[in-house]
Image (cartoon, rainbow, N blue to C red):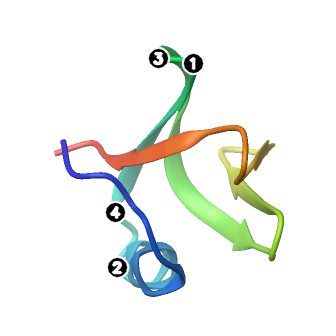
Amino acid sequence: MKPLTSDIHFYTAQMDRLPIIVFIAGELVGSGKIEDITKNSVKISGERYLRESCTFKYAS
């Protein structure tokens, strides 16, 4: 699973409606498609995740 590390990764995943998985400290905490992106957070499946606290990876 390739991590999303830059803004372009997040925006491309949002535009292409790619499934993303979210980890905090190595523990899976969420998954789904990106609904919104801000400087500090990413909204996936109705939940906001802080960019500095989470690792985001492509699900496939």
Tag 1's secondary structure? loop
How far apart are the alpha carbons under marks 4 and 3?
21 Å
Q: Viewed as shown, does residue 22 lie left or right of 38?
A: left
* Res 16 label: 2
Question: Circles 4 and 1: CB distance less than 8 Å?
Answer: no
How far apart are the alpha carbons under marks 4 and 2?
5 Å
List the residue tagged with mark 3. 26
Tag 4's secondary structure? loop
Look at label 3 and name its amino acid. Answer: Gly
**Neighbours of disc 3 within 10 Å: few (<14), some (14-19), many (20+):** few
How far apart are the alpha carbons under marks 2 and 3?
26 Å
Look at label 1 and name its amino acid. Answer: Ala
How far apart are the alpha carbons under marks 2 and 1?
27 Å
How far apart are the alpha carbons under marks 1 and 3?
4 Å
Q: Residue at x 39, y 83 (%)?
A: 12
* Res 12 label: none
**Neighbours of disc 4 within 10 Å: few (<14), some (14-19), many (20+):** some
Q: Is residue 14 above or below residue 27?
A: below
Tag 2's secondary structure? loop
Which quadrant, please, contains the C terminus? top left
Which quadrant, please, contains the N terminus? top left
List the residue tagged with mark 1. 25
**Relative image position of residue 30 (x, y in whole percent):** 57, 28
Question: Circles 4 and 2: CB distance less than 8 Å?
Answer: yes
Question: Circles 4 and 3: CB distance less than 8 Å?
Answer: no
Q: Viewed as shown, does residue 27 lie left or right of 52?
A: left
Q: Viewed as shown, does residue 30 lie left or right of 51?
A: left
Mark 2 or 1, which is nearer the eye? 1
